[in-house]
Image (spheres, rainbow, N blue to C red):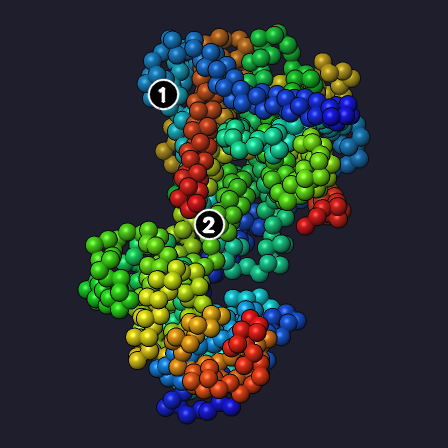
Amino acid sequence: MSSSTKRRYLKDKIAGKCMMIPAIIISFLLFAIFSLLLIHSEQILSMYSLPDLILSSSWKPLAGDFGFFPFIMGTVWVTCLAMIISIPISIFSAVYLSEYAHPKIRKIIQPFIDLLAGIPSVVFGLFGIILIIPVIRDYLAPMAGTTSSGYSVLAGGLVLSIMVFPILISIIYEVLGTVPMEMREASLTLGANKWETIKKVVLRKAYPGIIAAIILGFSRAFGETMAVLMVVGNVAIVPSSVFDPAYPIPALIANNYGEMMSVPIYDSALMFAALILFVMVVAFNVASKYVLIKIKRRTA
Amino acid sequence: MSSNNSDTVKIAVNNFNLDIGTNEILKNINIAIPKTQITVIIGPSGCGKSTLLKSMNRMNDLIEDLRYEGEIVIDGQNILSKETDVTELRKNVGMIAQSPNPLPMSIYDNISYGPKIHGFRDKKELDRIVENALKTVGLWEEVCDRLKDPATKLSLGQQQRLCLARTLAIEPEIILCDETTSALDPISAKHIETELLNLKEDYTIVFVTHILRQAKRIADYVVFLYLGELIEHGPADEVFNNPKDPRTKAYLEGLFG
Amino acid sequence: MNLRKREEQLFKAIMLLSLLVVIASLFAVFATVIIRGAPSLSIEMLTQVPKGGYYLGGGGGILNAIVGSLYLSIGAIIIAFILSLPMALYLNQYSGKSKIPEIIRMILEVSTGIPSLIYGVFVFLIMIQVGARASLFWGIITVAVFITPILTRGMDEIMQTVPIKLKEASLALGTTRYETLVQVIIRQALPGMLTAVILAFGRGIGDAASVLFTAGYTDSIPTSLGDPVATLPLAIFFQLSTPIPEVQQRAYASAIILLAIVLLLSAVSRILSRRFMKYVIK
């Protein structure tokens, strides 16, 4: 073997080993985040029991009350509302794009959806403040017979639903694309029309994939910080209607980071909140992947 | 020449031309497909046989950039006209594809799918239809105790018979077969052929194949297509034993294909 | 039968309506921001840093945030690129038949789903440990960490589309794996990789939650990595938080600037990928 060839092989080996390094780093990153958050939560976890923290609604940190329930419920209300709005719209849009739209139309619409995905969170928050809040305050709340400052679960849910459209639409569109053409043809040759084929065959086959997309959408929605923070009111109560303000977990963390340095227990409480958020997001993410893997195995 | 005598002709193809994009796929096709017989369309691969077949149930509508002229008349109606209700047409003209394509449902639901779409709701009625269809294709014994199983659990040969059964369930008068046995093992292929031979008394069957021996086994009437043109057609005996066109002769002798 | 057709028509209408809602929201967001922000958009906004009393209505602009964001995001994307490229290559060439790439891809996917806020908190906790203060440096680190999984996944997806035949052909000619990578795969994947980089850059520049704790905020343009730095998203946020209408208006104008950057990035990535497509073998 000539020396230049030897050198090439050596380069190859070194490059191979070097490339592994970032891979190892990334694998430990998640673990590191979890550990760090857990360590910082230790203090509050050692002073209060888990059920107390999660189920209590009293949040007076300076007095030592750390009830996370309002924040958990705030996250749940806003996220669920956003998904209830976004899921049907996204499914219908994706079905249209996949099954009915002319390829030219698809090409035109695609950039718009990508653009929507690229808009920064603060801008959505701004949009919420300029348009959504006044509409809720001046029209929707009175129509529903209540008053509201506009800063509400509804505002958060509406803004969040728009932010979730691109993720849901693109994943569901892809999932629909994996349904084999032969299945649609089978249904059509039996005399079904396109919509019946979609309803009874395509969506049925795509169902698990759609569920996976929804779970992933939830995961993204949980963690969305800025936009929701700007429009949701940030009042630590358990919402009883969509017109009530709320205080989702990301907002709690973002708003109070300044306090973190001064009162150690408060700091620990916030890190616990971050831990809850982290675990929720990872759990949903993994669940979504699990569903997708199961589908792949079933069809393979 | 096509005769429009509706006592013996089920499908009349008149002056039918079809292009996809800039390619002429079918040129000036004129055939009269006889009733309650098995008509086999033969010819080398890629000469338009499947395309002709799929025109008969308007499944060609799914292809982009496709244009056609001429008529295809079934029971006195030109099915190519814009007014045709395609879903009704396909109830009357069933089709079985080359590879089995079961729906993502149970065996029972696969068969009851068609009838349900077309209005049958009564459970007892559907049970009867499913049983009859499965019996006709000889599957009943094999699957009667596992009707709720997913159709994908069946073997390929069984799946193709399932596809035949679900087509029969909608009670068509015409059955189109697009190389229906090509993907199957010889035994399953034989099963299907036998079933078709039984069915021809009640159904008009049009069968596309590139396997000459198969054609000889089952055909009553033969149509020979080459490069999109109709070369010869007639009763099977005549075409196989006494081909008039030299190209037909050459094809039958295996000189190309 | 008529019923079936009617049902189809009804649902087609619903589908079109849904799509319209999605597109309309895009336009609504742009329209509201632009309409409300345009009056306050001025050259000063783009070319000056906030003067004293800016937040009380005084003069100046947000040059500090524009430059700050650029410094931060460019720094972050460089680091992210250095980390992501080898990882993407590793996943696509060195993996062989083992399960390792699958696992790593799974971890990457989960990492892309972690909210940027959590990355911000994570880096902040480290900063506390080492006694560091919020600065450009830590902002760059945070954004780099947050966008690296995104960039890696983007590049990985592109590289996966390089036809196996191409890799095989190159290997059959006697090149080592490393050489195959560089000369064949990267060239083939170039347009897609550029798109991935630009997309990740866009995510980084628009994010507020990650830099909230870690980059600080200042009215001046940073001169060293240890200085705090202003970012556009935070500039928008803080200007909005003041009670003074003129300053709030400026927040809207700042948002236009941010949107313009996002639009520009989107357009550039499209043009570039089309330009480079001619090197790609289909």
Q: Secondary structure at mark 2?
A: helix
Question: In this rendering, would B29 be left or right of A188?
Answer: right
Residue at figure coordinates x 41%, y 62% from the top left: A186
Residue at figure coordinates x 53%, y 13% from the top left: A259
Say which amino acid is labelled 1: Ile
Crowd rating for badge 1 (residues with CA inside 10 Å; few <14, some 14–19, many 20+) = some
Q: Is residue C256 visible?
A: no
Tag 1 residue = A54
Among the 4 quarters of the image, the one containing residue A189: bottom left
Q: Is residue B14 above or below residue A175?
A: below
Quarter of the image that includes the N terminus of chain C: bottom left
Dot label at residue A91 = 2
Question: B45 or A145, which is in the foreground?
Answer: B45
State the separation of the CA atoms marked 1 and 2. Answer: 34 Å
**Residue sitting farthest toward the left:** B124
Question: In this rendering, would B88 be left or right of C237?
Answer: left
Q: Is residue A3 above or below residue C24?
A: above
Question: A276 or B10, which is in the foreground?
Answer: B10
Say which amino acid is labelled 2: Ile
